[in-house]
Image: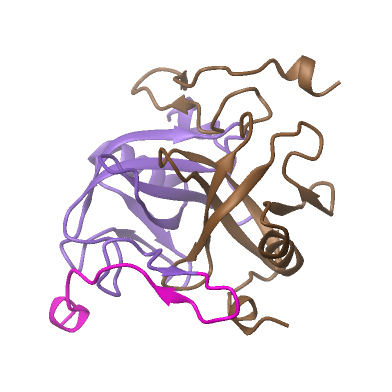
Chain colours: A purple, B brown
Amino acid sequence: MNAQLDGLKYDAAGMIPAIVQDHRTGEVLMMAWMNREAVQKTVDTGQTHFFSRSRNRLWLKGESSGHVQRVKSIATDCDQDVLLVKVDQTGAACHDGYYSCFYREYQPGGEWKVVGTKVFDPAKVYT
Amino acid sequence: MNAQLDGLKYDAAGMIPAIVQDHRTGEVLMMAWMNREAVQKTVDTGQTHFFSRSRNRLWLKGESSGHVQRVKSIATDCDQDVLLVKVDQTGAACHDGYYSCFYREYQPGGEWKVVGTKVFDPAKVYT
């Protein structure tokens, strides 16, 4: 039991969105969902855990790639229904090979433009 | 019609989460939800618009407080189901009077600790 974590507001499916940010540069790396257990595991282990709604299971970020995220701080917002987790990112956050998942930017009248830099080759990491 | 915006993935309720970040400091200010119309209005006006699920209507951020957010860039993630909007924030983002909504930090074994600085008095702004 942890009253501080129980006080968070989870949605109807028991999930809370967690924004992950690089603690040094402030770059936003990804957003994923945590259930109560994932929040607890993240706190207890100091590494981010999420709940995959498509695979219906808890996962440790980096369990396949080794690209774990070491937690530096966890904040919540005014409504206590979103988390902001600052981390030390190993490797890269995005499974597409970019440091941040937010590697595409809106271009008026055009296509989503890739602005991120690829730091690894997914085909070599996820074998 | 805007194929670039139509290509985003909205959830079953037609919503996409939008993370708002200070374009100068990188501070994450808030997360709120946009429907297709809010995304379009944000793009068209250059000011963030969201959809309030509790009030069931579109709103211009700052419509009551004057604390508008001028859009500098809009990015999307690998799954195209989250937006990251970098803004120039007028006043403060949080209706509780803090610059960022993420003004409370997790304290092991304690309470959520206020780490943000209050920049306005909500009682004077929302009259």
The x, y position of residue A75, in whole percent, is 44, 33
The x, y position of residue B101, in whole percent, is 56, 33
Task: Classify residue B125 as left or right of residue A2.
Answer: right
* Residue located 63% across and 71% down the image: B10
Q: Is residue B97 magenta?
A: no
Q: Does the magenta stretch include residue A120?
A: yes
Q: Give the range drawn in magenta.
A: A106-127
Task: Classify residue A18 as left or right of residue A81.
Answer: left
B25 up-or-down from B1: above or below: above
B120 up-or-down from A124: above or below: above
What is the quadrant of the N terminus of chain B in the image? bottom right
Q: Is residue B13 visible?
A: no
Q: Can residue B121 be seen in this view?
A: yes
The x, y position of residue B36, in whole percent, is 72, 69
B99 up-or-down from A63: above or below: above
* Residue located 73% across and 19% down the image: B122
